[in-house]
Amino acid sequence: MPKVRASKTGSASSSNNGAPAAQKRTRVLLADDHPVIRHGIAACLDKHDQLEVVGEASDGKDTLRKAKELSPDIILMDIDMPHTNGLAVTEMLRKELPQIKVLILSMSDSGTFVPRILQSGARGYIAKDSPTEELVKAIETVQRGETYFGEDVAQIALKQMMSGNAPGANNRELSPRERDVLIGIAKGLSNKEIASQLNIGTRTVETHRDNLMRKLDIRSVGGLTKYALANGLVMLREEVR
């Protein structure tokens, strides 16, 4: 974890006694299950005085807990994390802590998940191999209340949306609970395990599964799993695990 530096003063404003007022730094929480990546990003951001890394999280549950404890301004969120993927965590944060902005990180720059990222409530998306300058720009853009997508990713996503082939388009037909059940199915959980995780009855899970098959015109659990993967509801590594 980078050391905490004393805040630098800004020249644009001053306190009542005429002394320069301390510049407000953007508080950042890093959420990624790879410690090397977290530490590398933290070291890069630590060189920028306007940013402060206040904590690190290694999985979805840890991210939610530390978000509540630390109240960061922005979370740099990996999509593919254990327990709960980054997009599901982002949706939870949108409901429970809407003041926290989320910037999604990913190894992919294909633009495939952009519609799903927007649906989750995230404010932007950037590839993990982007230059530090672009990452800082993305953080500052999101902190101002704007959205940020790399130019290449945005162009790909726009073409997909214009052609009507954007992944996630059919997700709008699904209720939040149906999507939760679909994610559980894609992870290989039994009806009983899904019911326990969502605190609902097993029969209710079966009803949601039947509704999913009817709405999506899919006739097998394997088909539902492929749909969830294709639409970014669950990552391949998480489904295998």
Image (cartoon, grey):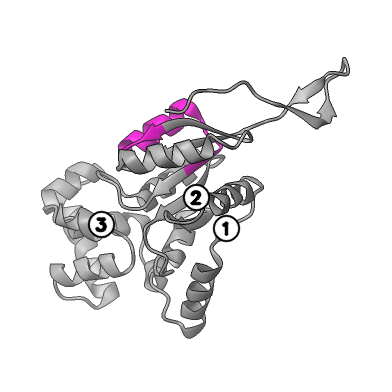
User: For the point 42% across and 65% down, which residue is it?
Assistant: 109
Q: Position of residue 72 (x, y in %)?
A: 52, 33
The N terminus lies in quadrant: top left
Q: Residue furthest top?
A: 17
- Residue type at mark 1: give it: Tyr
Mark 1 and mark 2: Cα distance apart in space: 8 Å
Label 1 crowd (10 A; few <14 / some 14-19 / many >=20): many
Between the C-alphas of marks 1 and 3, the distance is 27 Å
Task: Say which mark, if any, is on residue 72.
Answer: none
Res. 183 mark: 3
Image spot of residue 169 (x, y percent): 41, 73
Camera-nearest label, 1 or 3: 1
Instruction: Write the residue at 25% across / 67% down.
Output: 211
Going by the numbered disc 2, the residue's amino acid type is: Leu
Magenta-highlighted residues: 56-75
Quarter location, residue 207: bottom left
| In this picture, residue 231 sits left or right of residue 50 | left
Q: CA distance from mark 3 to mark 2?
A: 22 Å
Q: Residue at x 81, y 23 (%)?
A: 20
- Look at 18% across and 49% down and name the residue there: 194
Instruction: Please state which of residues 43 and 58 is positioned toward the viewer in this rendering.
Output: 43
Q: Is residue 73 magenta?
A: yes
What's the mark number on residue 103?
A: 2
Disc 2 is placed on an element classified as strand
- Percent x, y for residue 107? 36, 58
* Occupied quadrant, residue 188: bottom left
Q: Secondary structure at mark 1?
A: strand
Nearest to the observer: residue 194 or residue 97: 97
Mark 2 and mark 1 in contact (Cβ < 8 Å)?
yes
Please say whether residue 94 is visible from this viewpoint: yes
Which mark is on residue 148?
1
Precedes in sequence: disc 1 or disc 3: 1
